[in-house]
Image: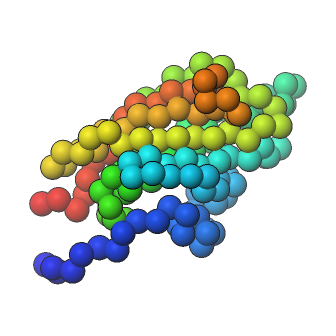
């Protein structure tokens, strides 16, 4: 067992590396962060359209955006890039994303216990007061014994 402290987490640096992850394949980018929250952006891309007739993004990429934003919030709240797994992530879609608009996903980690991190968040396409989805979930911390 190592006594070395893990390096602090910087979400901007993580996304600047552009390594081959699911979020990179979808076109997610860093947007902003605080001590316990993380915002990511999902640019409009024709390959992500779920309703071709209306040009609306599929729900899957928005869920992936929110999962990653909430993960970032957990790492920020814990102050380190430590392993965890999505245990539960409920998403309530309030409306479709507007065609040709970037979707911003904001995740917040509001509580961490010995083994679970609790998150909530929302996604919008330009106006945070008009969200297109809300999320609530839990992450299992995998570094605890």
Residue 53 or residue 18, whichever sits in front: 18
Task: Please state, as top left, top right, bottom left or bottom right, where the N terminus lies in the image.
Answer: bottom left
Number of residue marks: 0
Residue nearer the viewer, 125 or 53: 125
Q: Is residue 24 above or below residue 18?
A: above
Identify the residue at image location x=83%, y=44%: 46
Question: Which residue appears farthest toward the right when viewing the image?
Answer: 53
Do we see residue 87 in this rendering? no
Residue found 32% across the figure and 45% down from its top = 139
| Quadrant in the picture for residue 3 | bottom left
- Residue 15, position in %: x, y? 58, 64
Tell me where residue 53 sits by quadrant: top right
As drawn, is 54 to the left or to the right of 112?
A: right
Judge whether 14 appears above or below 131 on screen: below
What's the coloring here?
rainbow
Give the residue at x 26% y 53%: 141
In the rendered image, residue 38, in percent from the top left (x then y), is placed at 49, 49
Q: Is residue 46 visible?
A: yes
Q: Quadrant of the C terminus?
A: bottom left
Q: Image point 41% across, 41% down: which residue?
A: 108
Q: Position of residue 122 (x, y in %)?
A: 53, 32
Q: Quadrant of residue 44?
A: top right
Q: Position of residue 101 (x, y in %)?
A: 78, 37
Please identify the residue farthest to the top as the structure is shown: 94
Q: On screen, 10 above or below 38?
A: below
124 vs 114: above or below: above
């Amino acid at each position: 067992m190592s006594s070395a402290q893990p390096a602090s987490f910087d979400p901007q640096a993580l996304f600047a590396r552009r390594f081959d992850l699911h979020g990179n394949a979808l076109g997610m980018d860093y947007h902003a962060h605080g001590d316990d929250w993380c915002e990511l952006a999902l640019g409009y891309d024709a390959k992500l359209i779920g309703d071709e007739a209306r040009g609306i993004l599929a729900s899957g990429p928005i869920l992936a955006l929110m999962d990653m934003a909430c993960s970032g919030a957990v790492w920020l709240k814990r102050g380190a890039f430590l392993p965890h797994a999505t245990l539960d992530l409920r998403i309530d879609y309030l409306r479709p994303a507007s065609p040709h608009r970037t979707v911003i996903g904001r995740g917040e980690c509001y509580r961490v216990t010995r083994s679970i991190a609790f998150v909530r968040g929302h996604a919008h396409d330009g106006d945070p007061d008009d969200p297109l989805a809300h999320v609530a979930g839990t992450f299992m911390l995998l570094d605890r014994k």
